[in-house]
């Protein structure tokens, strides 16, 4: 099967309100091969909806992210998304990734767990003092990962209102004007460049100072622009998805009281619950970061021609019954946890270990709130690349 054999379907399928996976993905997984889709902007692309196809495309070096730079990449935004390390292939990608990777090893992240737990418990204590009900996003889900990544990177936590707005601009699918998009990008870059300059004058025990030192050791390894872009990438990616997944996970559990009761009865299930929730929750409103075939590649029943873009539908792949039996059910006893929630291959999420620790400690802290329930309907994010509550009112039993 080739592109000429396929009609092109409008994409994305998911609605921004809620966390359900659109039925169109199920239909696509039963198709003979990948389907062809047209996003609001950019050229048509293949869409890998089955687990095996998506994992193959994400992991095979014959599919290139760097090739997207010179192409009209499929996207939901008029403007091109963030570049930098996300638009690189090895060895350039490896050169930058290795500089940051040492800060996110499982061993190093586990040393951060007591601090993450302290922050999470402190936020829950503040919620109790302020009283029920409250907005879980503003009181807990956002400040937890923000404080963790700010401390790790070396960014003042009091500036969170600034980079939250900049981050929303980067991840927004709204029709920003060219001037608005450029201004957002320039403001964030200028802010980060200023922090880099401060750290260069006064180094600290943080990741930004370590990256500056790495550049000083070998100018060829990291340019000033790469340094600023890396810091921006760590800051935005280090808080946005976790801050979205915490209320997502809470909403899923609070609307499934039996699963919440299971965790309360056995808190040791929390790590398994995080893995299952990562699989179960389709975070993305769409599929992004197309991979371009650098030669003809057979993907399942489809021959992808050289130069064709392919998108991986992570949420759909994680609901593939051939890989995850009873995929539509939330189960904490699954034998396979090889989900694609953190990606796969060269661009596997650099901060996966940190995200796991934050999500585990977040759930453990929230389990300490007796009788936790939703106190109203969530207000959902719209026109964003990720789905989740912008506000999630919750209440608990006062003691």
Image: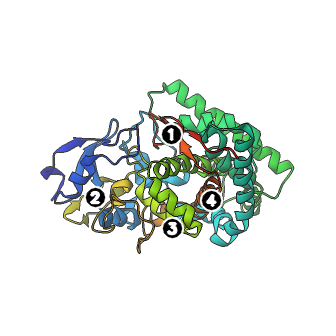
Image coords of residue 31 (percent x, y): 17, 57
Query: Does dot 4 land on a helix, a strand or a loop?
Result: helix
For the residues labelled 2 and 1, say whether their Cβ atoms are less than 8 Å apart: no
Mark seen at residue 306: 2
Residue sitting farthest toward the right: 202
Label 3 to label 2, Cα distance in Å? Answer: 40 Å
Q: Quadrant of residue 394?
A: top right
Quadrant in which the N terminus appears: bottom left
Disc nearer the start of the sequence (2/1): 2
Which of the two marks, 3 or 4, is nearer to us in this view? 4
Q: Is residue 166 visible?
A: yes
- Dot 4, crowdedness within 10 Å: few (<14), some or many (≥20)? many
Q: Quadrant of residue 37?
A: top left
Q: Residue at the spot x=34%, y=39% of the render?
A: 42
Disc sitting over residue 272 in the figure = 3
Give the percent coordinates (x, y) of residue 68.
41, 49
Labels 4, 2: front one: 4
The residue carrying mark 1 is 389
Instruction: Say whether disc 4 or disc 1 marks the residue closer to the N-terminus.
Output: 4
Direction from residue 263 to residue 58 in the image, left or right: left
Q: Which residue is mark 4?
A: 364
Cα distance, mark 4 to mark 1? 20 Å
Q: Position of residue 54 (x, y in %)?
A: 34, 61
Q: Residue at x 45, y 57 (%)?
A: 258
Q: CA distance from mark 3 to mark 1?
A: 23 Å
Left or right: 372 in relation to 196: left
């Amino acid at each position: 099967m080739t592109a000429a054999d396929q009609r092109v379907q409008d994409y994305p399928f998911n609605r921004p309100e809620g966390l359900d996976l659109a039925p169109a993905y199920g239909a696509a997984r039963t198709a003979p091969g990948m389907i062809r889709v047209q996003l609001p902007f950019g050229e048509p692309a293949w869409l890998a909806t089955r687990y095996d196809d998506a994992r193959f495309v994400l992991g095979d070096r014959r599919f290139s992210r760097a090739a997207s730079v010179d192409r009209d990449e499929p996207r939901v935004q008029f403007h091109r998304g963030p570049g930098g390390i996300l638009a690189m292939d090895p060895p350039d990608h490896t050169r930058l990734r290795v500089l940051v990777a040492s800060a996110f090893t499982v061993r190093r992240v586990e040393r951060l767990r007591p601090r993450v737990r302290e922050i999470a418990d402190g936020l829950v204590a503040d919620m109790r003092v302020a009283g029920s009900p409250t907005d879980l996003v503003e009181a807990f889900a956002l400040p937890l990962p923000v404080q963790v990544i700010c401390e790790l990177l070396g960014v003042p936590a009091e500036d969170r209102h600034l980079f939250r707005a900049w981050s929303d601009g980067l991840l927004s699918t709204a029709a920003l004007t060219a001037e608005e998009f450029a201004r957002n990008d320039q403001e964030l870059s200028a802010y980060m460049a200023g922090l880099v300059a401060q750290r260069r004058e006064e180094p600290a025990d943080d990741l930004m100072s370590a990256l500056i030192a790495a550049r000083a050791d070998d100018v060829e390894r990291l340019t000033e622009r790469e340094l600023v872009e890396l810091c921006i990438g760590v800051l935005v990616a280090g808080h946005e998805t976790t801050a979205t997944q915490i209320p997502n996970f809470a909403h899923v559990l609070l609307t499934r009281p039996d699963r919440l009761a299971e965790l309360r009865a056995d808190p040791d299930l929390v790590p398994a619950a995080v893995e299952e929730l990562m699989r179960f929750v389709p975070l993305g409103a769409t599929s992004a970061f197309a991979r371009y075939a650098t030669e003809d590649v057979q993907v399942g029943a489809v021959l992808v021609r050289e130069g064709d873009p392919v998108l991986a539908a992570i949420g759909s792949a994680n609901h593939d019954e051939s890989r995850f039996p009873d995929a539509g059910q939330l189960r904490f006893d699954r034998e396979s946890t090889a989900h694609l929630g953190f990606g796969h291959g060269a661009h596997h999420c650099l901060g996966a270990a940190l995200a796991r620790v934050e999500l585990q400690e977040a759930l453990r802290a929230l389990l300490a709130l007796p009788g936790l329930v939703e106190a109203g309907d969530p207000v959902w994010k719209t026109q964003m690349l990720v789905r989740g509550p912008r506000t999630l009112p919750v209440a608990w039993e006062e003691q």
